Structures are given as C-alpha cells and as structure tokens.
Amino acid sequence: MGEIFAGRYELIDPIGRGGAGAVWRAWDHRRRRYVAAKVLLQSDAHTLLRFVREQALRIDHPHVLAPASWAADDDKVLFTMDLVAGGSLAHVIGDYGALPPRFVCTLLDQLLAGLAAVHAEGVVHRDIKPANILMEATGTGRPHLRLSDFGIAMRKGEPRLTETAYVVGTPGYLAPEQLLGSEPDFTADLFAVGLVGLYLLHGRKPDSQALVAHFLTHGTPGPPEGVPAPLWDVLAALLQPDPQIRFKTATGARRALAEAVELLPPPATDEPSVEVFDQLGPVPSDFTPRGPESLGHQDGREGHKGHEGAVMAATVPTRAAPAVQPTHPTHHPAHPLQPTPSTPSTPAAPYAPYATAPTPVHAPSETGSFHLQPPLPGAAPVPPTTSAIPTSPYAQPHPYAQPHPPAQPRTGGIAPPPPKVTAGIVLAALLCFTVGIWALTRL
C-alpha cells in the first residue's frame, strides 16, 4: 500500500509529470473514490503563488476539469481533480490521425462550451492546446471533452506574475498579440481554439506563424484540403490575426459553429468511427476498482499516523510504477479507421496553401515563459527559460530520473542542550549546594 498524504489521499502510481509537480492516481479515503492528485514538488514563492491561484479556481461545468480540493503536508502541497482516463486530444490524434469533420465539430462545440464557462468567471486560460484537453474514455460513444490545466490562467485585472518582456504559453498556440506582450484577453484563447480545430482536421500541429503571415499578406485564404467550407468560415473567424475582427466570445463562436454544422453534408455511410480508449490502464494489484483491497481496515491503520511517509510518497514511488499500456488492441477490424502505430515518423510538411514559416522569435519549448527578441529598451537580456508549470496532467508516465532521497526520521523527545549550557547548569548547581552547606554551618 502507498503512504497517505495529509491523512486522506493515498498516492498510488504516477500518471504524469510537469516542471513543477507530478500527477498521481490517488485514492481519496474520505470520499471513497479515485482522483487525480497534482503534487507540487517545488516550494519557491513564485511557484507557490501560481499553485494558490490554480487550486482556488472552482468552475463546475461538465467540460471543465478544475481543482476540487487541496491539502498540505509539511512542505508539500497537492490539489485533486476528477480522474479522466481517456488521455488527451494528442492521444486521439496519435491513435487515428486526422478526424472526421463532424467529430471535430462535436469536440469544438464542447471546448467552446467549457471555455465560455471559464470566461464567464473572468478567467483567461492562456494555454489551450491538445495536451491540455482531456477525454473521458467513452469508447465508440459520444465523446466527452474536459478543458484542464489552469496553471498559468489568470483573472482579468489580476497582477501578472511575469515581467512584461516575457510571454507565457506554449509556442505554436499563441495569438499574435500575445507575442507582442499584450495583456491576456479572451480573444487569445479563441485564436488557440482555431488552431486546435486545424490540428484535429489535419492530424498534425498547424504552422501558426505561416498561417498568420498568409492572413496578413493575402487576406483570408480558401478552405484547406479536407476542411468543409462552412467549418472553415468559423475557423477563419477564430484565426484572424487582428483580435478586433476575431470572435469576441466563445458563445458567439459556438453559435456560428452550430450553424455551420447544419450546412455540412450528411456523413457517409462508410465514415469511420472513432473510439476513445482508456489510456490509464488498470490499478496496481493491491487495489481494486472500488479502492484498496484492505479498505475495511484503512481508517485505523498506521498509514494515517504521520507526514514523513507522505512526503516520501509525493517524491518517490513506493512501488515500481507499472507501464501504462492502452487497454485497446492494436487492430480493430470493426473500425474502418485503424489506429496508426505509435512508431516515430518524420515531421509532416506545412500544409497548403501556407508557405514555410519564418524563423520563430522564440526557442521552441514546452509550456512556459520565454523572452521576447529583441528585449524591451533598457531591459537586460535574459536567457530563455522554461516555466515551472506542468503541461498536461495526463501526459505519458515519466520515471523520476533523479529521485529525492528519503526523508530522515525525526528523533523523538527533547534534544539535549549544548555542552556549554550543560556545564553552566552543573556549576550553578554546585554553587547552590556550597551556599547551602555554608548556611547550615552558621546555624
């Protein structure tokens, strides 16, 4: 059995990792269910402030995956979310490649619905990308999408945690105004939604810089290959480089998408179905779908006794983590659209009609902060850095290359005083004894 964090959350196996923390599958002993627990591994003030912002977000919406609770144990903190087993949109594209337009419309409608709920709270997500859009394991049923990872989200009007010369987000999914250092706004999230739509329709990451350059030079292009014209009209309105002529709200974009769906041709009788598989795999052998095998004895066992073991559990797995294997076979005769093998392949060339992108102004990296080039006047040059914010709660498992050493057990009782203090106490006692003898002889 794993150790228990803060007397409540039993960390079972790591299911993802980011720059500032690891995501674990955990058992909630109070609510008797499995949850995803993001454990913060760093404790600097900047990272803790971002953590406080993220865990304070409470948005109850079926297409939003926001924190549900949090706990602290010594210098470790975590917050929990629903456990979503279907992986991310990146997993779906990895299995199938380009997706059918009507399936994409369903995903975009759910994404816009969740984003509308986020924006209604005054929150700008700032990191919408396929890896942060999680999927329930619905099989061949209707897909169910959850927008996650609010590590760099912020409410409009809140102070920024980065200098004005820095941009926070994922290269390739940033709106043009973000690259210029503008204040975060809802329209930047909508630009990223348009890029996600192209990613789903083509099965590869769009070249956002070449796309923006084409819009600015030649105006709105015609529909790319494989994208129906009504759907392209909606995506083009999301991808306008000028935020003033872009969709202003997620609700407005969703309404336009619904009208576009009405104009799409009916699906072909042989249109392939898409199955969203369970990407987490089974729980370890000493757990069952209903919790630990010894659940009846959990409330009184020693696992609740202290926090030292919990700190170890938050940094080093107490058992060898099983390799996460998809529960689906590699071949599905019933599905015309077969999952593509997960073997490395050469990067796809930029899709027509867009030209090759110019040299980027920032170094490609994961989600994080990177310095604008050239720096602002008077600002000292700062090398590019990656943020300590995790990318996707359900990325592929990542073994700890440099495990933290086990926490040293504490010594019980009161520590003895230093030798100098001990000598002083002894001298004072001798002096008192001598004075007492002298007083008795004077009687």
Image (cartoon, rainbow, N blue to C red):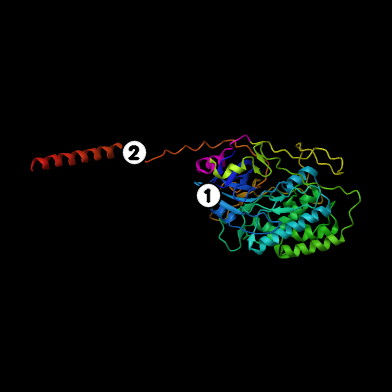
Q: Residue furthest right?
A: 269
Disc nearer the start of the sequence (2/1): 1
Q: Identify the residue under disc 1.
A: 72
In the structure shown, which secondary structural element does the residue marked by tag 2 occupy?
A: loop
Depth order, front residue of 295/407: 295
In the structure shown, which secondary structural element does the residue marked by tag 1 occupy?
A: strand
Screen quadrant of the C terminus: top left
Please tell me how crowded label 2 is: few (under 14), some (14-19), or many (20+) other residues with Cα within 10 Å. Answer: few
Q: Is residue 276 left or right of residue 32?
A: right
Please tell me how crowded label 1 is: few (under 14), some (14-19), or many (20+) other residues with Cα within 10 Å. Answer: some
Q: Is residue 15 left or right of residue 108?
A: left
Specify start and end residues of the magenta stretch as a single range: 302-320
Residue 197 horizontal/vertical position (percent): 77, 54
Residue 64 horizontal/vertical position (percent): 68, 56
Residue 412 horizontal/vertical position (percent): 41, 39
Q: Amino acid at mark 1?
A: Ala
Depth order, front residue of 143/203: 143
Return the mark for residue 27.
Answer: none
